[in-house]
Image: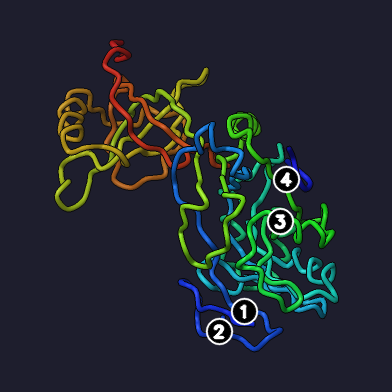
Amino acid sequence: MWRGRCPFPLRAVRIGTTIEDMAPSGALPTLSPMLATPGPLPAAGEEDQWAFEAKWDGARCLGRASGDGALRLVTRAGNDATATYPELAPLGERLRGRSAVLDGEVVVLDAAGRPDFGLLQRRMGVTSRRRATSLAMDHPVHLVLFDVLYLDGRPLLELPYVERRALLAELGLGEGPHWSVPAYVTGHARETWEATLDAGFEGVVAKRLTSRYAPGVRSAEWRKTKHLVTLDVVIGGWTEGRGGLSGLPGAVLAGLDEPDGLRYVGSVGSGLSGRERRELAAYLAVVRRDTPPFVNPVDVQGAHWAEPRLVAEVTFSGWTSAGRLRQPTWHRLRPDLTRLD
């Protein structure tokens, strides 16, 4: 069943903590987020032991509310991002009177309400408050909250996931102007998979209902499974590899046929074997050309062009705001689809 709201005493020293973690009672600690292990969805016979959340394509962030209306945001790398995302400051005021450490994901939503990492990149790393405030007008961020680690001076790390989520719900944060506490699903892994795929999310995160929070640890108690899309693309060029790949394709330049011509959609190099690179080098030498076959600009240096004859199958996780393949991986050449004219 759905829980929450959907947009859609001794303390042990744990792996991943720091000296700052061993703060006096009542002080907010410095922690690193718990991470999920890549893997398949839990089997149907055990899915009722897991909670399922949408996987958001954003940047992990811990929010530290001191109870006086202030909120400090810390990235997964430990950097202070408070000034970077000024529109999240009202969350601190919403938590006035309650001290807490919250775990979540900072995202930027596109016009369809889906997270767009390309848009988020424009906001990341900005330290000027004036610049950050200006960017927040055009590309406001949204903080997706899905865990609470400390509350009113009480460490919650040893509590099971379901109890932490219940305490998070009891904070009554609801749907704020720039934050939310999305739902999770118990069981129904395949339904969640289909729903997140249809909604355009990056994938699913499965969390064992009994899992404790292990700061800084990539735990098998949390499992992430990404959606991958398969696509046939036309090869219109290539870039040379480095080092031992000198003279061979380091990446191919991929395009899609559209009414006005071949549109460049990105370069694909990940997943290519040495044998495939050598074969491609031979094929591309035969179909070389002096001008780009694409109707739009190609933003790569040192490109070699090719007649758009060869077709390849690739997988990718989505589209960037610039219309490029996100995280593309080479799968195979499709000789059965080779274009002869």
Residue 314 in the image, given as x and y percentages of width and height: 38, 30
Is tag 2's residue or tag 1's residue first in the polypeptide sequence?
2
User: Which corner quadrant holds the N terminus?
Assistant: top right
Q: Residue 165 bears which disc, if any?
A: 3
Q: Residue at x 50, y 78 (%)?
A: 13
**Local secondary structure at mark 1:** loop
The three-letter amino acid code for the residue at tag 2 is Glu
Placement of 191 over or under 212, stated as above or below: above
Label 3, secondary structure: give it: helix
Q: CA distance from mark 4 to mark 1?
A: 27 Å
- Measured in 3D between alpha carbons, the distance from the residue under mark 3 to the one under mark 4, in whole angstroms, is 10 Å
Horizontal side of residue 107 vs 251, given as left or right: right
As drawn, 25 above or below 52: below
Q: Which residue is mark 1?
A: 29
Mark 1 burial class by Cα count in 10 Å: few <14, some 14-19, many 20+ = many
Residue linked to disc 2:
20
Q: Nearer the viewer, mark 1 or mark 3?
A: 3
- Which three-letter amino acid code belongs to the residue tagged 4? Ala
The answer to the question of whether label 2 and label 1 lie on touching residues, with beta carbons closer than 8 A, is: yes
Local packing at callout 3 (Cα closer than 10 Å; few below 14, some 14-19, many 20+) is many
Q: Earlier in the sequence, mark 1 or mark 3?
A: 1
Q: Earlier in the sequence, mark 2 or mark 3?
A: 2
Mark 4 = which residue?
183
The label nearer to you, 3 versus 4, is 3
Secondary structure of the residue carrying numbered label 4: loop
Q: Nearer the viewer, residue 130 or 332?
A: 332
Q: How is the image coloured?
A: rainbow
